[in-house]
Image: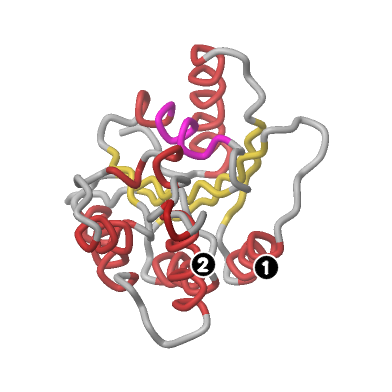
Amino acid sequence: MKVSGTLFNVIGISGAGKDTTAEAMQQWLPQSTVMKWVQPTKTAIERAYGLEPGTLDDRELRQRPIDPSKGSFSYLDLLIAMANVKANSEMQFGLDMVKRQITETLVSGSHVILTDTRMPDEAAAIADIRDMGFQVVTIYVTGRGTELPSDEYLDRNRMLMQDRGVLEVLFYNYYSTTVELANNVLWKLDELQTLYGIRVFS
């Protein structure tokens, strides 16, 4: 009988190192896929503005003005505006599609690593996936070893997921080299399996 994969929900404020942590996790988890809630929105914007697929995955390119002659409004500003519309309406902008992709990947036995859970509907979807019987763990990445930075959306969503039984662990991402980061990610993954019973390694 095939064993389902685990959903690793990597969260943190902007610049905390969520994507680099996810990349390090993939070194130890070859049967894993990185997904983002925002991907359908990114794809729609790239198509609308004639950009190459994957263009908006680049942080620097996201911050460029869409039309410099009309002001500084950037692709990142557009992504944030669309996310806020979604958070304050019934419009899903691909959330259900990503949620289905996540569950299908988990059923196949592969792990999923999410790196952009920030809106209330996304946090609720994480809890829904746990309620379906899948193993879910939130990894809260912070770039400081002494204090945890605060973010209104992030704090609210952490509470929502915790209230619905989603396990959360901390990961202090203040390592100076990629080797140090990779080794400490391995330690954290081993901790999840040995102390919390989360399926990590086959």
Q: Earlier in the sequence, mark 2 or mark 1?
A: 2
Mark 2 residue element? helix
Residue 25: image location, x then y, percent: 42, 31
Write down the residue under mark 1. Answer: 156
Whether pointer 2 and pointer 1 mark residues with C-beta atoms closer than 8 Å, the reply is yes
Q: Residue at x 38, y 60 (%)?
A: 37
Q: Residue furthest bottom?
A: 90
Q: Categorize mark 2 by other alpha carbons within 10 Å: few (<14), some (14-19), many (20+).
A: many
In the image, residue 161 above or below residue 201: below
Residue 93: image location, x then y, percent: 33, 73
The secondary structure making up most of the magenta span is helix
Residue 7: image location, x then y, percent: 40, 51
Mark 1 residue element? helix
In the image, residue 74 above or below residue 174: below
Stretch of the chain drawn in magenta: 17-24
Write down the residue under mark 2. Answer: 123
Q: Residue at x 43, y 26 (%)?
A: 24
In the image, residue 35 above or below residue 129: above
Left or right? Give the position of 33 relative to 196: left
